[in-house]
Image (cartoon, rainbow, N blue to C red):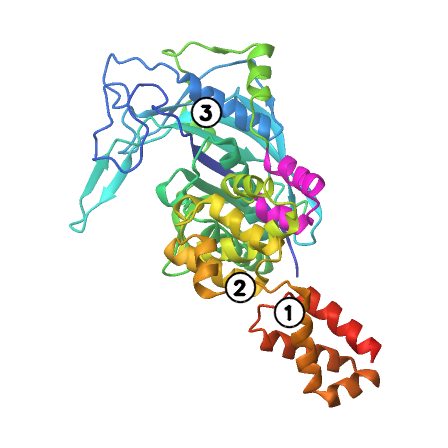
Amino acid sequence: MSYETIVGLEIHVELSTNTKMFCSCKNEFGGQVNQNTCPVCLGMPGSLPVLNKRALEYAIMAGIAFNCNIAKDCKMDRKNYFYPDLTKGYQISQYDIPLCYDGYLEIENEKEEKKRIRIQRIHIEEDTGKSLHDPNGDTLLDYNRAGLPLIEIVTHPDISSPYEAQAFLEKLKETLLFLGISDVKMEQGSLRCDVNINMKKDENTKTNISELKNLNSFRNAVKALEFEQKRHSKLLDEGLNTKKETRRWDEEKQETILMRSKENVQDYRYFPEPDIVDISLTDEDIANIKNNLEELPDEKRQRFIKDYQIPEYDAKVLTSSKEISSYFEDIAKAIDNKKLVSNWIMTELLRRTKDEEISLDELKFTKQDFIELLKLISDSKINNNAGKKVFRKMFEDGKKPMDIVKEDGLLQVGDESEIKQMVQAVLDQNEASINDYKNGKDRAFGFLVGQVMKASRGKANPQIVNKLLKEILDSL
């Protein structure tokens, strides 16, 4: 029997500000342990937090990008709970009045249909420290992360499958990267995802919610959801239920493991943070932030289709990151054939960078070198196959394209009289193929083209070869 899957996401995103949320300590990853700390982020008695204005602006940028309303008046709250890496015994967060609310993000589901996933709220808060477990079983605490600025993005339970969850997370990550407000590196903890899932038979029969904590990759999020789908479906089949609980994904066992029963809101004993003044925004404040937003992926995608006359698939690939879209535009400005640029970036450049696991700014050749290569191809000075040979050497050795072309003798023969001699020589040696062509055998023409290209060692301009060959054959 099939059941309805109900999924909601809670996503924590570290903001890429220079300093922490409530103090002037550095916001950086990978520093010496407990180096970036002060009395404020260590929760020392008498220390007073001051809200980071840039973090507030970044949060508003996210809210606008995700179609949220922005609260002009809101406040910070204390969320009370004990954990070793929570220095103060409470976290400064937001409870009943989030900064951003009632937004949405549109995705494509498995059927390639548009689906709107509602965003309940985006609120600002501080991060906790980090527990490090050594081989002896001891737990050490690094408070460099304590107090880093976070936004928490909470969706409504509108997601109906692991596929939709992944599509939402990927689009969310893509948008945050374009905004430039987070590096969203899951391996460094700057994007962390909690998942709430339950299954529904009908209005009166559903399982209790299971919360899956701190999933460190989209792949693991999907696997954990697929596992929980099966687990909850089995419970419904057997007429049983699960407790409202928090679970974690065990990579080794490929299953979720019970951590604890799930807390209720009242357990956190929220109350307004008395050491931070309330946040008050004007329409002008919000408008200024909105007017300075970067072009978002969906907008850029539609512009690429319209301005560069490329297919939707190409536009999706080329706007998959801010880096790739900027690279494409810089190259496309110098080359008339935009489809040529699109094809080469997608099929050659991105394939090699993916295989070598490098970014575009780590390439051994410059943008101008790449432009020169594409101009050689578009001007028919070298053919596509020769272009691939040149690109390979550019990628591996950083050589200039024209130097490679000269060294390897790759310049394409474009002189019609020279090519005509090659064509005639091939025809003189292939009388049977001429007869086949005259008898309507199309393969014969292709064979003869191939023989001319072989005779020219691939250097003859194929368009000219085709034109001259047809003219001569039709005149016989």
Q: Distance between the residues labelled 3 and 2?
A: 54 Å
Q: How crowded is mark 3: few (under 14 residues within 10 Å), some or many (20 or more)?
A: many
* Residue 297 spot, x, y in % from top left: 60, 38
Q: How crowded is mark 1: few (under 14 residues within 10 Å), some or many (20 or more)?
A: few
Instruction: Give the residue drawn at x 28%, y 37%.
Output: 130
Q: Distance between the residues labelled 1 and 3?
A: 71 Å
Q: Secondary structure under badge 3? A: strand
Q: Distance between the residues labelled 1 and 2?
A: 20 Å
Q: What stretch is highlighted in magenta?
A: 296-319
Q: Residue furthest bottom?
A: 432
Q: Secondary structure under badge 1? A: helix
Question: Of discs 1 and 2, which sits in the foreground?
Answer: 1
Name the residue type under label 1: Glu
Q: Which residue lies furthest to the left in this view?
A: 136
Would you say the residues marked 1 and 3 are in contact, meaning their CB atoms lie under 8 Å apart?
A: no
The disc label shown at residue 386, or none: 2
The image quadrant of residue 85 is top left
Vertical comparison of 188 with 26: above or below = below
The disc label shown at residue 124, or none: 3
Q: In this view, does 278 lie to the left or right of 316?
A: left
* Residue 81 spot, x, y in % from top left: 35, 29
The disc label shown at residue 418, or none: 1
Is 19 inside the magenta-drawn segment?
Answer: no
* Residue 48 spot, x, y in % from top left: 30, 13
Q: In this view, does 433 lie to the left or right of 190?
A: right
Name the residue type under label 3: Ile
